[in-house]
Image (tube, rainbow, N blue to C red):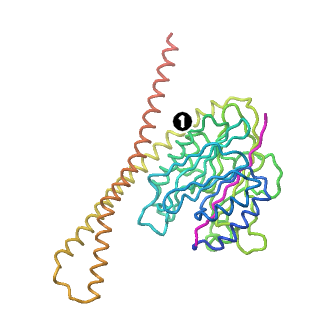
Amino acid sequence: MEFNLNIFTLNCWGIPIVSKNRKERISALTKYLNTSEHTIVCLQEIWSESDYLYIKDNLNKILPYSYYFYSGVLGSGLCIFSKWIIQDVFFHQWSLNGYIHKIHHGDWFGGKGVGLCRIKCGERLINIYCTHLHAEYHEDDIYLAHRVLQAYSTAELVNLTREPADVSIIAGDLNTCPGDLSYRIITQLPSLIDPFDLPCEGTNPTIRKPSGTSETANNSYTDKKQAETLPEGKRIDHILFHVSPSWEAKVINFGNPLEDKVPGEPFSYSDHNAVTLELKLSAATSNSEEKKLIRDKSFDATVAQAIKVCEEATETITKSKKLFLTSGGLLFMFLIATVGFWPNKIIYDFIKIVMTGFCFYYLLMGTLWNKIEMNSLKAGLNALQNFNKTRAEVKSLNTNVEECKNIE
């Protein structure tokens, strides 16, 4: 009654035109996967459909089943390849997903979210969730509330859909390190296990335990100054898992499976390092209820912190609304007041066009876009508050039941 899973995940940095050596790297990755023993592959940032089709065609013999999650303007960038039949698919696009005016970041245009493939392996069901959360980009992290709510939405999806699957696995670029708020939300709500701290029973010498997966010194695309400051980089790409009570999982291998550089080339497979996890699953012999109770207690503090982050974000959005409307209103009044005073020259016509553009932009951001963002944030905040409230009520009810039993 035992079976093995061998999962692989990589943020491929596959942005057409922008990403360096994209075609060569995709070709090298496909060649590696063709000679590997991975049974399930989750890829992120496959932004070109032609890249997905290329990988699909070349992996057809060893991973014949695949699915690409189309979304947004550019596509979600997410795809899954499997040795076994993909029975069901589902994609949840996040409502709060970056800013439309941050064109250079591009997250809003990607329509990112979390994709689910339910895979049928014999009589067993495996849920595979592939996702890519919003990046920080800056030290002040203006996207913290976005990422927190994306993490909560992902955790809730796993929590609500993991039955009747025997195994549920999240793989992808979560853009959050162990201990961060988003990481705690994803791991604690659906009780997902991070194999990083678990013992490995395998002896595969080609797999190294990951100290970091992004901005590491061994990656050719990492900035040299960044590599000197933090050579181990950040561990933000993860494979997390949950098994049903009827199963137990042992970690056979876990780590970075790819070489530092593409063989024969001066560059790496991506600006991220890949992660692989091999699990051996067998019938359960122990009860995990005690661990569940511990997780529930710790999650209360995590939810409270997430609520605080969202409340602060609503205040920031309210302030930005006033700033946008004030700036747009002043520009509008200036343009109206100066009608007929502008000299009839091309340079002044150009200035008026630019000022009109900024006026329209400020008014749009302070009205339509601000309303969309506020409603998305409120939806996530209300869900967190509801979770907090109902959890407290359930605990209170259970306490009263226990007290009644003791009295009897």
Please indicate whether residue 388 sits to the left or right of residue 337 in the image.
right
Q: Nearer the viewer, residue 89 or 179?
A: 89
Task: Quadrant for the N terminus, please.
Answer: top right
Q: Position of residue 164 (x, y in %)?
A: 62, 34
Task: Establish if 317 lies above or below 17.
Answer: above
User: Residue at the spot x=60%, y=55% of the render?
Assistant: 68
User: Residue at the spot x=80%, y=45% of the render?
Assistant: 201
Task: Establish if 253 lies above or below 272.
Answer: above
Task: Establish if 216 lies above or below 203.
Answer: below
Please indicate whether residue 257 sits to the left or right of residue 359 in the image.
right
Q: Nearer the viewer, residue 119 or 134?
A: 119
| In the image, residue 70 lies in the stretch drawn in magenta | no
Task: Establish if 88 lies above or below 346.
Answer: above
Q: Which residue is mark 1?
A: 297
Give, as a single range, the part of the protein colored magenta. 1-16
Where is residue 292, by image quadrant? top right
Whether residue 3 is visible to the viewer of this picture, yes or no, is yes
Q: Residues within 10 Å of mark 1 (few under 14, many from 20)?
A: few
Whether residue 193 is visible to the viewer of this picture, yes or no, is no
Q: Secondary structure at mark 1?
A: helix
Where is residue 77, by image quadrant? bottom right
Q: Position of residue 376 (x, y in %)?
A: 40, 50
Please indicate whether residue 230 sits to the left or right of residue 366 in the image.
right
Where is residue 167, by image quadrant? top right
| In the image, residue 12 lies in the stretch drawn in magenta | yes
Q: Position of residue 23 (x, y in %)?
A: 67, 70
Q: Position of residue 372 (x, y in %)?
A: 36, 54
Extreme residue toward the top, this view? 408
User: Residue at the spot x=60%, y=71% of the render?
Assistant: 19
Q: Nearer the viewer, residue 67 or 276?
A: 67
Question: Looking at the magenta stretch, what is its main secondary structure?
Answer: strand
Q: Tag 1: residue type?
A: Lys
